Amino acid sequence: MSERTESGIGRSILGSKPLVESGFTRTTLRTWTTWCGTAVFVVGAAVLTGWVFDIDSLKTVYGPITMKTNAAIAFVLSGVALLASASGYRTAAAAGAAAAGAIGAATLSQHVFGWDLGIDQLIFVESPGAAATASPNRMGPHGSTSLVFAGAALVLLRWPTRQSLRLVQGLAFTGLAFSLVAITGYAYGATELFGIARYTGIALHTAVGLFILHCGVLTAASQYGAIATFVDDGLAGTVIRRLTMPVVALPVVLGYAVIKAREIELIDRGLSVAIFAVAVIIILLATIWHTAAVIQGSDGERQRARDEAERANRLKDQFIAILSHELRTPLNVMLGRLHLLEGEVDQAARVRVARIVARNGRLLGRLVEDLLDLSRATAGQFDIAPVPVELNALVRAAVDAHALDAAAKGVDLAVGTDPALRTVQADAQRLQQVVSNLVSNAVKFTPPGGHVGVRTARRGGDATITVSDSGIGFDRDFEAHLFQPFRQADPSFRREHGGLGLGLSIARHLVELHGGSITASSPGPGRGATFVVALPHAGGDANALRGDTRKNYVEAAT
């Protein structure tokens, strides 16, 4: 009983190039191997059926040359070997392949050494004089050699290494060349090939079956070497896959056209050769030109990717600089005030120091909380607990929390709520964090004498929160980056307004977790900005509110 192991497709080889999980997945390649094995098995079984019941249409499908009995048996064994290899039974695959290869080798030895081993008519007898047959019911050297190559290749797959896979692919490519010569000969009308039929003759379905067999061997040996490059999703694999079909098919089609033109005497021999040569030159030049164009396009893509990576690194460096500045500023204030307590100070001074330290401590706490929120969102660990929430009350509470800051700065802060709005399904703490962030930004970026307005409304099936201001605004170019982490309109840590620039990206993530959306608009720099949060109105499914936003946020953050 064979030990079931991972198939030749799935087994990784130490130090070899890994198989890329792209359009050509391991499952896809294993499926191709299975199809090839099934096709080869069916061809062999059909021909054996023809010999058993003496059905000539199964022995030969085109022309007078028949597939011999031993060839059909070898096809059945080879098909079973491919199927076993695709299913991971490499020992069984090697056994079937060895038997098929032995049949081919024994037949080939009869052609080479001129002896008769008595294997040709061991099961079925063929009358003398069959077309393209050196001895009754003996497959030709063409087919027997190809079976030796296929059998040896499948046996070597039992112990896949770099060296063995190179040899496997070399044998398979040679077998493909043998079968393509025969198939092309039939396409050109040379059914007995080159006029020496007893050495080169091969049945059409034998040639096609051998072609499929060697294709199956290649898909079973795709972990390394030429086939690994062919199935790779990178530039090399893409170029090879695009060019293989035209490079193979066009010369064959052209040759067929030239032969037909000569048959009806449109061209003579010299002109036909000249046409074929010029056409091949054109095909090669087109291939080179196309390859160069693909490489040029890939170079451009790599350059764009490199520029994007460099930009991302610069943004992260800027963020680290900003973070260092934002953490150092309150720390320096706290340390400076605490140093005063080391001397003789009165009680009133101690109270003032305590208030300053507490205020800067809270600022540090908010900075750390922003960093933790960013980390949770990026890792997909940012959960919410939606419950029915009175939206108008929540918005008023968030606005009231910033009323003193707005008054101290001389900014008019107004709030208007829609009494028709009742409740929304939301995490009250997180939704208040969103509103608070938007109001805080509006107050911070609005100059003294400016206006900040907050209002709620119902729009269709959504409840909306609109925060508008007459502050610094932003230009249209920056609008696309407004909610991205590490992006700020002013990246300098010496900028006037401070902050880490994470609030809007975290706010967007929280809103999307609630099943809503957040948008921003501005007429331009110095002309204010408007932010609109839209949330599903009451009755939403709390479990469905989270949506599929974590993945989007991670992609944006990276």
Image (cartoon, rainbow, N blue to C red):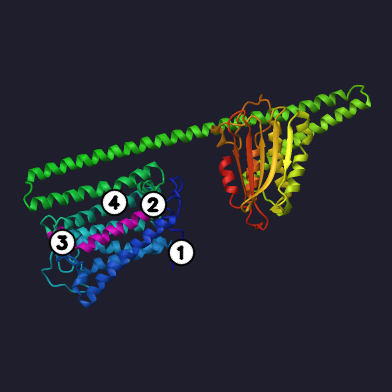
Residue tagged 2: 222
Q: Amino acid at mark 4?
A: Phe
Residue tagged 3: 114
Residue 401 is drawn in which quadrant?
top right
The first of marks 4 and 3 along the sequence is 3
Q: Please tell me which residue lies in front, 12 or 448.
A: 448
User: Counting other residues with Cα less than 10 Å from the Cα at mark 4, is it few (<14), some (14-19), or many (20 or more)?
Assistant: some
Q: Please tell me which residue lies in front, 354 or 234.
A: 354
Residue lying at 17% horizontally and 64% vertically, measured from the top left? 115
| Residue 174 percent across, percent down from the top left | 26, 51
Gap in Å between the C-alphas at discs 1 and 2?
A: 22 Å
In the image, is residue 210 part of the stretch drawn in magenta? yes
In the image, is residue 489 part of the stretch drawn in magenta? no
Residue lying at 68% horizontally and 42% vertically, measured from the top left? 373
Q: Amino acid at mark 1?
A: Glu
Residue tagged 1: 3
Q: Amino acid at mark 2?
A: Ser
- Say if mark 4 contacts mark 1, CB within 8 Å: no
Identify the disc placed on residue 173.
Answer: 4
Identify the disc placed on residue 283.
Answer: none
Q: Please tell me which residue lies in front, 113 or 315.
A: 315
Q: Which numbered disc, 4 or 3, marks the residue closer to the eye?
A: 4
The first of marks 2 and 4 along the sequence is 4
Give the side of residue 204 with respect to residue 459, left or right.
left
- Is any part of residue 99 visible from this angle? no
Report helix, strand or loop for mark 2: loop
| Residue 239 percent across, percent down from the top left | 34, 43
Give the side of residue 148 with respect to residue 329, left or right.
left
Report helix, strand or loop for mark 3: loop
- Is any part of residue 471 visible from this angle? yes
Q: Over which residues does the magenta segment extend?
A: 197-219
Report helix, strand or loop for mark 1: loop
